[in-house]
Every structure is written in structure tokens, then in C-alpha cells.
Image (tube, helix red, strand yellow):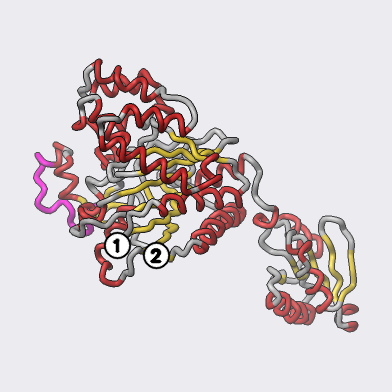
Amino acid sequence: MKPSIPKGTRDFGPAEMARRNYIFDTIRSVYALYGFSQIETPAMENLSTLMGKYGEEGDKLLFKVLNSGDFLRGISPDQLAEASPALAAKLCEKGLRYDLTVPFARYVVQHHDELTLPFRRYQIQPVWRADRPQKGRYREFYQCDADIVGTDSLMCEAELMQIVDEVFHRFGIRVCIKINNRKILAGIAEKIGHADKIVDITVAIDKLDKIGLDAVCAELTEAGLPPAAIEQLQPIIACGGTSDEKLATMRRYFADTPTGLKGVDEVEHVLRTVGPLANAIELDLTLARGLNYYTGCIFEVKALDAAIGSIAGGGRYDNLTGIFGLPGLSGVGISFGADRIYDVLSELDLYPEATTTATQLLFVNFGEAEAAYALRTAAAARRAGIRTEVYPSAAKMKKQMQYANANAIPYVALAGEEEMAAGCLTLKDMQSGEQQRLTPEQLIAKLTQPAAQQV
């Protein structure tokens, strides 16, 4: 049988990994600038940790892991025939993590005595979702999360907006940052007399961009909202104007709804705090971020020049740790979708040239004595930070040059008997074809110049 991998997963070769590491390193460096510390959590969590935290739709997308050993012990044929959620709970005690936020909440509760609050953490790890694979949507993908837990200060939201701006500025990607507040959505649900339907309302309107207004209304009808209530939602969904104009409209709308007014106040405070960056932030009253644990400001980032879904998102959660027995710890976080960012950078051809180059310098191997000479100079080049290879065998020159070309190695060093006797090397620029005879010190100086390092 021809080997294959599961749909929605991918292999990454050296070129892809160089680009992915460029993404991870860029995000990691910005997180570090803002004082975040890195942690990691296991790929698998207990299902009791994961279930019920993402809403009914999220629970369906959890990859469950069969219990080890005799996992069918105690399961009757009738139970097997049912294939019910209760059966799944008996067969599976663990699952692959769906995101990094819930495992982080579990981590905070478990390690609470070791942490100094507020605690800033970042985490760059893969997550898994049993979703239908399509462009920009994978079953295995990386998230790059940063969270601040232990404070309810809206300064944190403002800082996260600055982080988003800085990361995408470094990538050269033009973005629109969309913001909303779950209190605004809860206020709308109260205003139309269906506060008990807040989850159904947010899940439905969060799909507006994907399925359209008619389908959203049909979904709300199916959830039990009467036509009059759905009609009351229409002006909110269609509310236009600038962010300031929308806030003014919502302030009038919520004149007798404290929950909604609180949400308006919070969004307004964040927009005021970020200063000029507010021009890149748009209040989107249809933004819902379907995850149930959000309670305050929520945000999502879209690329302006590429047709792809959200490339970053996040929000405030006031009591996520409460479900693990530690109530009252408010937190807020952002997550960058590394795989979608990869696709956007590829589509817009925004990768720096240096990210696609692994080896900078290849030493040709002419034989045992020449290889020993090359190894000594290669060691010095590596100490100077030059990514260097020595070809492993004394193959024909043509084969070694083909190897350099195939791997886009910009410089090749040749050291035969003549060069060894003179204590130097011949350096060939593979792009221009120019050759120079240099001492090892001159070669290293040339390749550590800024122009050469960019190659």
C-alpha cells in the first residue's frame, strides 16, 4: 500500500520549516518584548478537562483517544450498537487538545501556588480538530497564544492589540482588527427578550460572513427564536458607520440595558487607550467568537490582501479557571493562526529571501587531505555564524556543484593542492559565477558582511 497521511494534516520539508520557523520566531520575539514567558502543556488532556468548554459544536470536533489496553472491557454489545456519547465517554478518557486556552486554564489552577499574578504566558504548540478539511482549515495546526491571567484591567486588551499590530507589521501583512464585546451580545439577547438564547444567537451570527443573513435567520428560527425577535436583530446586524458612530448607536439602544452599556464602555475604553492604532480597529457587532468561555472584549484579525479566514483572534474570559475549582481569575488572550499566516505570506510572496536559504557555504570535497583542510576552515566559519557544509565524499565536481544549485547554496569554497599550499581557498559566487582567491579570514569576513548575510 502506498503510504499516506490523514486528510487535514501535512508534511513540512526543509523549505517549509524555514518559513514556519520565521513565523514562530517573529511571534515569539514580539511576545518576549511584552514580558511573556513560555510554557508547554501535553498534546493529550483528560476529556473531563476539555468537554463542555467549547460549546456543543466544539465538543463534536474533539479528537478522542481510545483507552489503552482492553478498552472494550465491560462494554455490552447493546452499548456498542448505540454508539452514543455515553459510550464514547467509557471508551475514551483522553483527547487531543482543541486549543491552548483551556489547557492553560487547567495549568493555572494546577500550578497556582507557583505563579505570581498577573501571569503572562505564551505557548506555541499544535492543536487538533476533527473538522472538514478545506483551504485554510486543517485538522492539525499550530496556535501561537499569549494570555494574561489574574487581572481584569483593560490595559491588557490594549497591549494585545499592539502585539497584533507589531507582529503583522513585521510580516508586512496589512490587516483589519475587528473588535466586539460579549456583553454587547448578551445585552442584545436581553433587549429582544431572549437572554436564555445567548449561546444560540452568538453561534449563529458568528457565521454571518460564511453562510449569509438568510441562513443565519434560519438557524435562529431552528433554535427557537420567534420571527419578531429575529426581526429585532436585523438593525443591529446591519448597523453601519465608523466605530464611534456604532458605539453611539449602541449606547442609545442600551439606554435601559446595563449589561450592554458595560460592553460599550469596555470597547470604547480599549479604542481610546490604543491611540492612533484605533484607526486599524473596527467595531463589528456581528463578531461573536463562538467559544462559550468569552465574557468581555473579543477580537479577530483578517488579512486585507488575501481571501482567507481569521488569521488571529482572542478575547476576555472572566472565570475560565472557575470550572476547575479556582473562581475569580480573569484573563484575556490572543492566538495567532500560524498555518493561515503561512498561507498568506506565501500567497503575497512576503517571506524574506534569507528564510529560504539554509546552508550559506559549501566546501567541495576533493579527497581526504583536502577534506581535512576544509573541515578546519568550516569550523572557523561556523564559529563566525556562517551556516556551512562540507560535501561528505570526493564525488565528481559536477555532482557537488549540482548539489549546491539544487539546495540554493549561494557560495561554494574550493580548496585543492594549490590552495592548500598557499593557505587560502577559492570562493565561488553561485549566482554571478565570480571567483575569488581568499584566505580563510578574508572568506569569513566577506560572508559575515550584512549583504552576504542577506543571501
CB atoms at circles 1 and 2 under 8 Å apart? yes
Is residue 424 visible to the viewer in this orientation of the structure?
yes
- Which residue type carries mark 1? Tyr
Magenta run includes residue 75: yes
The dot on residue 63 is none
Q: Is residue 113 above or below residue 146?
A: below
Q: Residue at x 29, y 72 (%)?
A: 114
Q: Residue at x 54, y 45 (%)?
A: 277
The dot on residue 39 is 2
Q: Residue at x 22, y 18 (%)?
A: 226
In the depicted view, which residue is nearer to us: 242 or 402? Answer: 242
- Residue 84's quadrant in the figure? top left
Magenta run includes residue 390: no
In the depicted view, which residue is nearer to us: 66 or 77? Answer: 66
Q: Main secondary structure of the magenta part?
A: loop
The dot on residue 107 is 1
Q: Residues within 10 Å of mark 2 (few under 14, many from 20)?
A: few
- Which residue type carries mark 2? Ile
